[in-house]
Image (cartoon, rainbow, N blue to C red):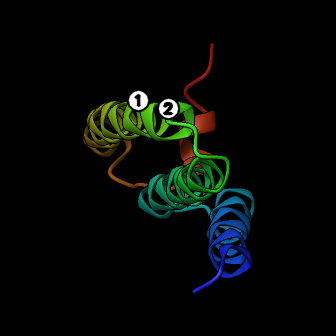
């Protein structure tokens, strides 16, 4: 597969994740959409790193994977706390917890 195919795949994953974050109201789907955004960005970092024969994109992708794992752990903790307080995983209900 050529570089353009991988760039298109990364772009589609990023856009699908962005669409999920903006449209969905379920906290679990929002977290999964954020993971899609990280995956799309990671694919593009790897593709351009390979294209330009530079390891910086691959190193950055390793850090991106670590950040995504931390985001998933913190998001799961927030999800459990929200469910214990409000008995729902709706993002709109989480907005009521402000202040």
Give the labeled residue for mark 2: 60
Q: Horizontal placement of 79 versus 41: left or right?
A: left
> Where residue 30 sits in the image (x, y, percent)?
53, 56
Which quarter shows the C terminus?
Answer: top right
Mark 2, secondary structure of its residue = helix
Q: Horizontal placement of 66 versus 58: left or right?
A: left
What number is the disc on residue 63? 1
Mark 1, secondary structure of its residue = helix
Query: Image quarter for residue 25?
Result: bottom right
What number is the disc on residue 44? none
Query: Image quarter for residue 53?
Result: top right
Q: Do the residues labelled 1 and 2 touch (CB within 8 Å)?
A: yes
Task: Pick out the residue farthest to the front.
Answer: 53
Residue visible at 65% across and 81% down in the picture: 2
Residue visible at 63% across and 76% down in the picture: 9
Which quarter shows the N terminus?
Answer: bottom right
Characterize the local packing of mark 1: few (<14), some (14-19) or many (20 or more) Cα atoms within 10 angstroms.
few
User: Where 76 sits versus 12, above or below?
Assistant: above
């Amino acid at each position: 597969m050529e570089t353009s195919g991988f760039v298109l795949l990364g772009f589609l994953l990023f856009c699908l994740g962005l669409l999920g974050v903006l449209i969905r109201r379920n906290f679990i789907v929002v977290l999964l959409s954020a993971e899609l955004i990280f995956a799309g960005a990671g694919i593009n970092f790897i593709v351009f790193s390979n294209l330009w024969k530079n390891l910086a994109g691959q190193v950055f992708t390793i850090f991106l994977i670590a950040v995504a794992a931390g985001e998933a752990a913190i998001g799961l903790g927030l999800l459990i706390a929200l469910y214990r307080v409000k008995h729902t995983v709706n993002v709109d209900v989480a907005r009521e917890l402000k202040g």
